[in-house]
Image (cartoon, coloured by chain):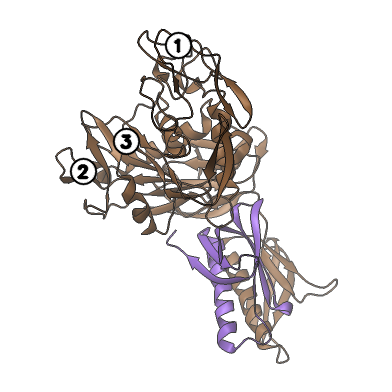
Chain colours: A brown, B purple
């Protein structure tokens, strides 16, 4: 590019030795608006040159004066800055399973295997330090499939405090799942102590990667079916500067070893970072209270999508007044389905349908979608569990192969996979791999309908 | 007012009509088309404000930073903009 006598000359081409000359003319007859947008246009061209981005320029046939310009189109999009040991992601469409990130400089090529691959998103929990600092070109590739190469500037740090891992549907208030590093713990005695997680950023990143894999790659496809996850916003917050005060202590201990979210603190906490979530997964590092738990969502009263359960009218609320939430140990067993299981609770609603654990008998009371009770434990399990939106759903006669204990009165919906425990049951008893467990025939469409209502809001 | 959040996937400037078109979304193919327009009758201050938003969107596009574009509920014209820390 060159500036001379009211004209900016631009060479556009695939290499310095193969360019075509164009120009932007700042004319005395231009309006103030035209001059200002020509200045914007030149800024685009300068930015593209400095960042090694392709550009597209518009000009008359046979003429060299640029009348419009923009960045060239690429088939992938890096998300946010590339920082060693920070989250990193690349979005696109039709990304094949097994895709890897390839970072290239003039002298080095580094291949990074992502923690998650979805058709629209490749996610790395911690960008390896092997990727050279400075200008790289990154692409995705697997087999014969290769994306465009995109320039990125890699830095050593510092890692970000809040990061949009995937920005979700381009609209107001997309359905959002936030993954938060907890700063303080309310003990059983009622005091507030610091959460050691804030000194274990690497552990937080690994846990976030596990949560995303659990939600989006396990055999249970309730979230990802139809690629609905391309409309969901995922955000991570790790703020090592937070004191363990009342506002930042997002979990509390329950005897003997359960950690539970302080659900009424979550919305205010997130708003300080400009976020609003439907589900909040709070990661903590307690070594004494490492058993996970979840709270149901409390939907806002309006608007909502109506549905019927056993002929009674209910509503899937479109927004949460209090998000669903789960407290998850940073050291949770990676063989299990803890994030998916707890999200099963969290996505359901206090007043319009709870999804509860199936590995305990429980007692009748609040409106529960996935459990009913016989009058006596000796009574036969009824053939039908419930009618949902006019369709009858059978009950599980065998309790997904585990068998109902003799004293239990509760019974459940029939499973999708009768050979393995329900995701909401004791999936650790799966004969092969808990990751292969599914939900049941009722909860799957119920959650899908509820998710659809919220995604389409 | 509505807010559209995402990465600036594409940005095109057309000085002849004093407009910038901006595609915002999570992926290159999942975007919302919005625009910044400088009205002929706009004051110098209003015009400079619009053009400064275009500069911010340009910088965000290159850095792959997420932006929040604010526009009317039934309008694609960006009237305000937020660029967060990341």
Which residue is denoted by mark 2 in the rendering? Answer: A186
Q: Residue at x 43, y 16 (%)?
A: A374
Q: Residue at x 45, y 11 (%)?
A: A431
Is label 1 in a helix, a strand or a loop? loop
The residue that mark 1 highlights is A431
Question: Disc 3 on helix, strand or loop?
Answer: loop
Disc on res. A330: 3
Could you say which quadrant of the image residue A285 lies in? top left
Q: Answer yes or no: is residue A206 visible.
A: yes
Mark in front: 2 vs 1: 2
Find out whether the residues at labels 3 and 1 contact each other: C-beta distance under 8 Å. no
The residue at 23%/52% (across/down) is: A246
Chain label for disc 2:
A
Q: Position of residue B47 (x, y in %)?
A: 60, 83
The nearer-to-camera label among 3 and 1 is: 1
Among numbered discs 3 and 1, the one appearing first in the sequence:
3
């Amino acid at each position: 590019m060159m500036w001379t006598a009211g004209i900016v000359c631009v060479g556009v081409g695939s290499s310095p030795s193969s360019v075509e000359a164009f120009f932007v003319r700042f004319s005395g007859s231009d309006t103030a608006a035209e001059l200002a947008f020509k200045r914007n246009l030149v800024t685009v061209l300068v930015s593209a040159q400095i960042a090694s981005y392709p550009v597209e320029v518009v000009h008359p046939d046979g003429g060299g004066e640029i009348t419009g310009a923009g960045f060239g189109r690429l088939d992938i999009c890096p998300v946010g800055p590339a920082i060693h040991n920070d989250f990193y992601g690349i979005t696109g469409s039709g990304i094949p399973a097994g895709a890897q990130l390839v970072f290239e400089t003039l002298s080095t090529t580094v291949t990074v295997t992502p923690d998650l691959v979805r058709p629209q998103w490749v996610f790395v929990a911690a960008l390896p330090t092997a990727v050279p600092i400075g200008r790289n070109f990154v692409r995705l590739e697997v087999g014969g499939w290769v994306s465009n190469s995109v320039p990125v500037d890699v830095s050593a740090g510092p890692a970000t405090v809040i990061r949009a891992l995937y920005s979700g549907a381009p609209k107001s208030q997309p359905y959002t799942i936030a993954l938060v590093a907890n700063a303080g713990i309310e003990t059983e005695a009622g005091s507030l102590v610091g959460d050691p997680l804030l000194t274990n950023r690497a552990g937080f990143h690994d846990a976030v990667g596990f949560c995303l894999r659990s939600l989006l790659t396990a055999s249970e496809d309730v979230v990802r079916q139809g690629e609905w996850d391309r409309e969901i916003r995922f955000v991570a917050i790790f703020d090592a500067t937070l004191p363990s005060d009342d506002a930042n202590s997002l979990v509390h201990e329950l005897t003997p070893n359960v950690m539970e979210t302080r659900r009424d603190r979550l919305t205010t906490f997130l708003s300080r970072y400009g976020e609003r979530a439907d589900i909040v997964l709070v990661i903590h590092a307690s070594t004494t209270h490492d058993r996970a738990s979840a709270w149901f969502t409390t939907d806002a009263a309006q608007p909502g999508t109506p549905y019927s359960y056993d002929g009674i009218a209910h509503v899937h609320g479109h927004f949460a007044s209090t998000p669903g939430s789960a407290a998850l140990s940073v050291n949770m067993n990676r063989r299990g389905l803890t994030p998916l299981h707890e999200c099963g609770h969290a996505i359901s609603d206090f007043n319009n349908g709870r999804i509860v654990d199936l590995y305990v008998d429980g007692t009748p009371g609040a409106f529960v979608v996935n459990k009913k009770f016989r009058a006596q434990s000796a009574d036969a399990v009824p053939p039908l569990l419930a009618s949902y939106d006019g369709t009858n759903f059978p009950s599980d006669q065998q309790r997904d192969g585990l068998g109902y204990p003799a004293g239990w009165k509760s019974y459940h919906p029939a499973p999708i996979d009768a050979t393995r425990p329900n995701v909401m049951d004791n999936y650790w008893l799966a004969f092969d791999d808990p990751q292969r467990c599914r939900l049941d025939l009722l909860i799957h469409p119920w959650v899908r309908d509820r998710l659809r209502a919220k995604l389409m809001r | 007012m509505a807010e559209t959040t995402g990465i600036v996937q594409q940005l095109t400037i057309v000085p002849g009509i004093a407009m910038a078109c901006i595609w915002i979304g999570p992926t290159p193919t999942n975007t919302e088309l919005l625009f910044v327009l400088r009205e002929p009758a706009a004051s110098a201050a209003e015009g400079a404000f619009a053009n400064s938003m275009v500069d911010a969107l340009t910088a965000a596009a290159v850095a792959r930073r997420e932006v929040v574009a604010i526009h009317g509920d039934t309008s694609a014209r960006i009237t305000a903009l937020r660029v967060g820390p990341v």
